[in-house]
Image (tube, rainbow, N blue to C red):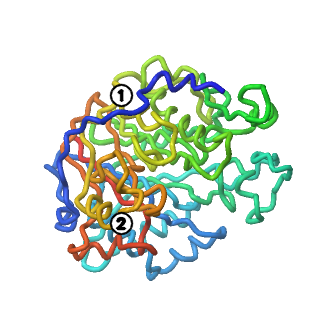
Amino acid sequence: MTFSRLSRVAAGGAIAAVVLLSSAGAAAAGGQHGSGDDVRFATFNASLNRGVAGQLRADLSTPDNAQARVIAEIVQRARPDVLLINEFDYDPVAATLFRDNYLAVGQNGARPVHYPYHFIAPSNTGVASGLDLNNDGTVVTTPGAPGYGDDALGFGAFPGQFGMVVYSRYPIDRRDVRTFQHFKWKDMPGALLPDDPATPAPADFYSQQELRVLPLSSKSHWDVPIEIGRRTVHFLVSHPTPPVFDGAEDRNGRRNFDEIGFWSDYVTPGKGRYVYDDKGHRGGLRPGSSFVIAGDQNSDPLDGDSIPGAAQQLLDNRWIDDAFAPSSAGAAEAATLQGGANATHRSDPRFDTADFADTAPGNLRADYVLPSKAGLKVRGGGVFWPVQADPLSRLTGVFPFPSSDHRLVWLDVR
């Protein structure tokens, strides 16, 4: 086994952060930005995924789906200008229905939010590989059948499950959007390819045939250029696989690490030369470009099951501004009330963004909005996690959640 990519990052330690608490109550009051020049970027794993293909479209075809109304209200309370939604099944019609039937309709007294522009593209989740990717001796190619998700290019019961969508108040330069759905994991220098511990050969869990097919991205990675006045901000979005649900080979943990590391390489001058997009264009982001990295990274800096140093690939990157960590009073309260694994965590619970099982792994900081140091100044931010005494806590709730086990995270930049 080799951990060559780990040498690039710190394996732990405290994370310095300038903390500015932004309460859910402020969002409820209209989500005011610092000024008219500020732009609010947000990420939200909204759990708008369904068990069968087409169900999300059916649910969103009328304006009365209970979960979708709660998700829309959270967005309306926070009022981001540019929003990534993770776990939104790939369906262009469903993306339009959610915008028109829910976001653009005031929910429970909240003001509608209007997004003239959105972007959605296919996801690797639930796409049959035709190969035995979990090495259980069986190739499963029937969507929804037991074992199908483990043999798919990214875990999913049908093509596009757990996808994502971007909504924006600002124009999207669709001609220059780059997607990296088909970039192969083996083509990343120093890739942490999983090893079969039962054999002496290194990095041999996947066969050469499988590596020729297997993409790095479990869903996709997108570079979505947002045109804000005369400048362009690259919205770099993804949703790395959870680092669990595997075996001693840690195939998901290793893939998670490298999916996170992809953006670190992409924004670092000279590090992204190996990158190629789905149109065949090569290279990383142009030096000096402004960007915001967003998404459910499925990795806490200090707690949980991800490989140590996974999140630090972004947090410690000199081109990324991590000095401000969005936080909430609700997350700190939840960690205290729920106890369990939370009592032994090393990360500050104010920064948690996901309400996971109290036994393991506990609540984690899984969702990030990280701006470039070039061209952007952080003005504030927060996590939509109200304390229980706040009337808006009905939107986040406790298990079984009325919305999602993740919380919307936002950052204001200028």
Give the residue displayed 34% in from the left and 74% down from the top.
105
3D distance between C-alphas at marks 1 and 2: 42 Å
Query: How many other residues sit within 10 Å of disc 2, few (<14), some (14-19) or many (≥20)?
Result: some
Q: Where does the image place residue 338, in percent across and percent down from the top left?
A: 35, 66
For mark 2, give the secondary structure.
Answer: helix
Quadrant in the picture for residue 337: bottom left
State the mark number for residue 256.
Answer: none
Give the residue displayed 52% in from the left and 32% down from the top.
262
Q: Where does the image place residue 172, in percent across and percent down from the top left?
A: 41, 46
For mark 1, give the secondary structure.
Answer: loop
Which residue is outermost to the top? 270
Residue at the disc numbered 2 = 338
Which residue is outermost to the bottom? 64
Give the residue displayed 18% in from the left and 66% down from the top.
25
Q: Amino acid at mark 2?
A: Gln
Which residue is outermost to the left? 35
Quadrant in the picture for residue 254: top right
Along the line of sight, which residue is nearer the eye, 125 or 363?
Answer: 363
Quadrant in the picture for residue 19: top left
Give the residue displayed 35% in from the left and 70% down from the top.
396
**Left or right of residue 132: residue 235:** left
**Left or right of residue 310: residue 147:** right
Query: How many other residues sit within 10 Å of disc 1, few (<14), some (14-19) or many (≥20)?
Result: some
Q: Earlier in the sequence, mark 1 or mark 2?
A: 1
Q: Where does the image place residue 296, in percent across and percent down from the top left?
A: 45, 50
Residue at the disc numbered 1 = 289
Q: Are marks 1 and 2 in contact (CB under 8 Å)?
A: no
Q: Nearer the viewer, mark 1 or mark 2?
A: 2
Q: Which quadrant of the rendered structure holds the C terminus?
A: top left
Along the line of sight, which residue is nearer the eye, 4 or 360?
Answer: 360
Along the line of sight, which residue is nearer the eye, 383 or 280?
Answer: 383
